[in-house]
Amino acid sequence: MAGIGTLSSDKLVAVKNIAHWGDTLAQMLKTKQYLAAIAEFRPDWFILSGGGNDLQDLLSHGKLVEAYDPARPIDQCLTADGLAMLKEIAGGYRSILAEISSMYPKLTFICYAYDYPRPTWKSGKYIGQYLKKMNYPKATWDSVAKVMIDRLTASAGFKALAHRFEQALGVARVSASKRSQPVASSSKYRKSVSQGRRSSPRSAPKSAPTRRKRRGPRRAHPK
């Protein structure tokens, strides 16, 4: 998880990273490891990013995108199963944050989006191979990946967070050229916990708990 690695390297912030390689949001909800981590670590922040592995799994089974049709606009490539998965991910975010906020009402949440993956990386070993099976020309792979991430961000990642929290959610917007990083600012934050799927070569971020060490008022931000 690139973003959490950045925070961990900052000696002002103590981070408890409970992300695991390949974890789906459904697995996070099932194990509820975040509850034990919060109880033990008592963080100031709870950082969450997830859903990418859920989409990856659906893609690997040929159910996330429609078979390539040159007459179909790329932004309409998601299947009914893919759209249903986005709703399921949105529900997962709501469930996690509602559960935690009911137990820890003063805990601040930070949610951040995924950067765009690179389907052509390692000759398409991770994402491109599935698009190839669906007959997508290689020139369209980046556009399909952008549709996946944009829909995840808009549909599940943040519009799902219709909760009242004492602090505003920090959201780092992804771009095609720069990897996203979590944005965390305020001198009073000392600790943070991160939950989510661990980053793998096939996509981007997840989440973790962090705690800030007292050294006077300074901003914690990715370097």
Image: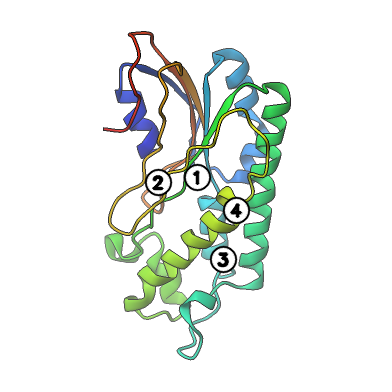
- Looking at the image, tell me whether mark 4 or mark 3 is earlier in sequence order: 3
- Looking at the image, tell me whether mark 1 or mark 2 is earlier in sequence order: 1
Q: Residues within 10 Å of mark 3 (few under 14, many from 20)?
A: few
- Looking at the image, tell me whether mark 3 or mark 1 is earlier in sequence order: 1
What amino acid type is highlighted by mark number 2?
Ser
Which residue is denoted by mark 4 in the rendering? Answer: 156
Residues at circles 3 and 1 in contact by the CB criterion of under 8 Å? no
Q: Residues within 10 Å of mark 4 (few under 14, many from 20)?
A: many
Which residue is denoted by mark 2 in the rendering? Answer: 200
Residues at circles 4 and 3 in contact by the CB criterion of under 8 Å? no
- Looking at the image, tell me whether mark 4 or mark 2 is earlier in sequence order: 4
Mark 3–mark 2 Cα distance, whole angstroms, equals 18 Å
Mark 4–mark 3 Cα distance, whole angstroms, equals 21 Å
Residues at circles 1 and 2 in contact by the CB criterion of under 8 Å? yes
Residues at circles 1 and 4 in contact by the CB criterion of under 8 Å? no
On the rendered structure, is 53 left or right of 140?
A: right
Which residue is denoted by mark 3 in the rendering? Answer: 61
Query: Which label sits in the foreground, 1 or 4?
Result: 4
Query: Which label sits in the foreground, 3 or 2?
Result: 2
